[in-house]
Image (tube, rainbow, N blue to C red):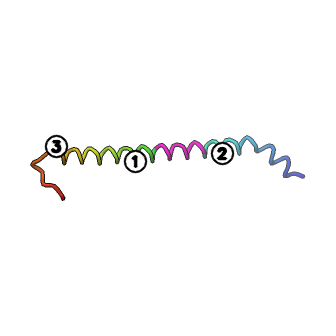
Amino acid sequence: MGIHFNHKSKAGDRKMQKELKLKQKAEERKKKREDQERLKQEEEMRRLEELTKPDLPSNE
């Protein structure tokens, strides 16, 4: 019978833990998305550099 009292009294703690976990996952996804976008932009800039500078040897 004691388990019912403990379960209900700790509901707020479980809710806060769940919210924290969701917030951490959202931050990880955001960071991963930003990193991918940054890498894509760097690759695009590198390609544009290769195309616009004729004095550099091409890798083809």
Q: Is residue 51 left or right of residue 18?
A: left
Query: At 85% across and 49% down in the image, what residue appears?
Result: 4
Residue carrying label 2? 18
Left or right: 50, with 8 as reference point? left
Residue furthest toward the left?
Answer: 55
Residue 50: x and y, percent?
19, 48
Q: Position of residue 28 (x, y in %)?
A: 50, 47
Q: Residue furthest bottom?
A: 60
Q: Residues within 10 Å of mark 3 (few under 14, many from 20)?
A: few
Mark 1 is surrounded, within 10 Å at the Cα level, by few (under 14), some (14 to 19) or many (20 or more) other residues, namely few
Tell me which numbered mark, 2 or 1, is placed earlier along the sequence.
2
Q: The magenta stretch spans which residues?
A: 22-30
Q: Nearer the viewer, mark 2 or mark 1?
A: 1
In this view, the residue farthest toward the front is 60
Q: Amino acid at mark 2?
A: Lys
- Residue at 70 percent across and 42 percent down: it is 15
Q: Secondary structure at mark 1?
A: helix
For the point 54% across and 43% down, the residue is: 26
Amino acid type, residue under disc 3 in the picture: Thr
Q: What secondary structure characterizes most of the magenta part? A: helix
What is the secondary structure assignment of the residue under circle 3?
helix
Provide the residue designation for mark 3: 52
> Residue 36's mark?
1
SS type, badge 2? helix
Q: Amino acid at mark 1?
A: Gln
